[in-house]
Image (spheres, coloured by chain):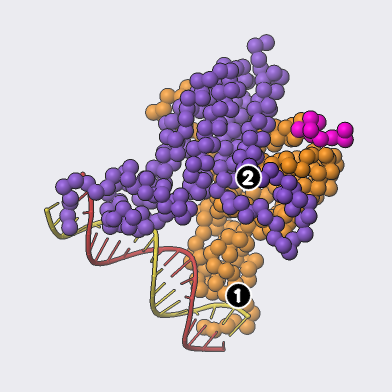
Chain colours: A purple, B orange, C yellow, D red
Amino acid sequence: VGRPRKALLDRDRIAATAMELVDEYGDFTVPELARRLGVQTASVYHHVDGRTGIVELLRVRIGEAIDYAPLELRPWDVALEAFMRSYRAAFAAHPRLVPLLATTPIRDAGILAAYERIVAVLDDAGFPAPVIMTALTALENLVLGSALDLAAPEVMWEVPPEVDAPRLTAALAAQPPGTGRADQAFDFGLAALMTGLRDLLSRTGGSG
Amino acid sequence: VGRPRKALLDRDRIAATAMELVDEYGDFTVPELARRLGVQTASVYHHVDGRTGIVELLRVRIGEAIDYAPLELRPWDVALEAFMRSYRAAFAAHPRLVPLLATTPIRDAGILAAYERIVAVLDDAGFPAPVIMTALTALENLVLGSALDLAAPEVMWEVPPEVDAPRLTAALAAQPPGTGRADQAFDFGLAALMTGLRDLLSRTGGSG
DNA sequence: ACCTGAACACCGTTCAAGT
DNA sequence: ACCTGAACACCGTTCAAGT
């Protein structure tokens, strides 16, 4: 009872344990978290700004898991595509966290710095200024939409027996087994967006 | 006190009022809902299967707001693109509902019937069976990712003053004013996916 | 069948009291 | 500064009691 000689808790341990709970149960509560940390619920509040603050810690963690090195690659489309893959991979490591973060995308210094670099890459490549934000938003939507898909149980794509949907059932059966449906959809979407961007550049921008 | 001669509540009024609350506040609680319905909290439970059941009612409502007529159009790409727009428009009418539904996509009879028809359309157009589910998933990801974007406050895309991101700031300033950034990103993404699908068909499928 | 009032377990959060 | 124990408001849900 009273302050221990060495602190029992710190933000890192809180974040790591919350992440464990989300990975296991898809969500967390502060009492649950405290129990796992071997501490009283109220103690947690001395280190973070409420439950919201813990979710923010998890958001930052995901942001830190993104590998920004691909942005150094050239030409622009190789850099962009590789970065988007690393962005999505960070979510894929903790799919059940995605719905908790989905309301508001990551807007920490790391992501903003990455976006600054992406804008520069697109700008230098010759994209017209008015479309750059459109492209960036479309790419982010792709990553978030695909990340949500990772969180959805595969059962979501099963046709209930009482529903008569023979061709949908056949299409489901025709999927390459084992290969992740979600991964393939992301690959397809990313390839399509990249082609769209290259087309756009050759039509409206370029060195001419 | 006791049962009234005519029922005060029904599922439709519950759903409509819950939708009002979500539109206004971005969420709802059962006591809030009961208060607005002029009824005791416990009364609500006689008509729906808990709070989860109410969310399901809202999910169904969104599904019913989708216009399936575009699926009758020809050729296949016109039908598909028009349907995806109507799908997304249903979410756009209640953007703040999206995060509540995001965890699990709509899987009611209407959507399954629509997907059955889309699969048929793609199949008849000549798409190879193994890629049809990939295409369908990519399209759904686009709609859900863009719908989440609708729910995000526009402030999300502001650069905090302490962050040095001049080119991102410039790109934000170069956006066509008034025109929805979210809408344009959806348009771009949809156009890119449609082009990707047409390319895929001409390479792997077709009447040859 | 449908509404009420009371109850229960649980959650997020605060705060005075201790070291 | 950091942990505890107790407290508070609120939420989702249940249930016996009434008509």
Disc marking residue A184: none
User: Residue shown at 42%/31% (left/top)?
Assistant: A109
User: Residue shown at 62%/55% (left/top)?
Assistant: A155
**Mark 2–mark 1 distance (CA, rounded to whole Å):** 52 Å
Circle 2 or circle 1, nearest the eye: 2
Q: Which residues, given as a range, are shown in magenta? A: B200-208
The quadrant the N terminus of chain A occupies is bottom left
The quadrant the C terminus of chain A occupies is top right
Task: Tell me the amino acid under the disc marked 1.
Answer: Leu
For this rendering, which residue is in front, B51 or B108?
A: B108
Q: Secondary structure at mark 2?
A: loop
Q: Is residue B54 left or right of residue D15?
A: right
Estimate how packed mark 1 is, as few (under 14), some (14 to 19) or many (20 or more) residues with alpha carbons within 10 Å. few
Q: Is residue B183 visible?
A: no
The x, y position of residue B178, in whole percent, is: 61, 34
For this rendering, which residue is in front, A88 or A199?
A: A88
Q: Is residue A183 left or right of residue B115?
A: left
User: In the image, is residue A111 above or below residue C10?
Assistant: above
In the rendered structure, the residue with mark 2 lies on which chain? A
Q: Secondary structure at mark 1?
A: loop
User: In the image, is residue B16 above or below residue A141?
Assistant: below
Disc marking residue A178: 2
The x, y position of residue A162, in whole percent, is: 73, 64
Residue B1 among magenta residues: no
Disc marking residue B8: 1
Task: Tell me the amino acid under the disc marked 2.
Answer: Gly
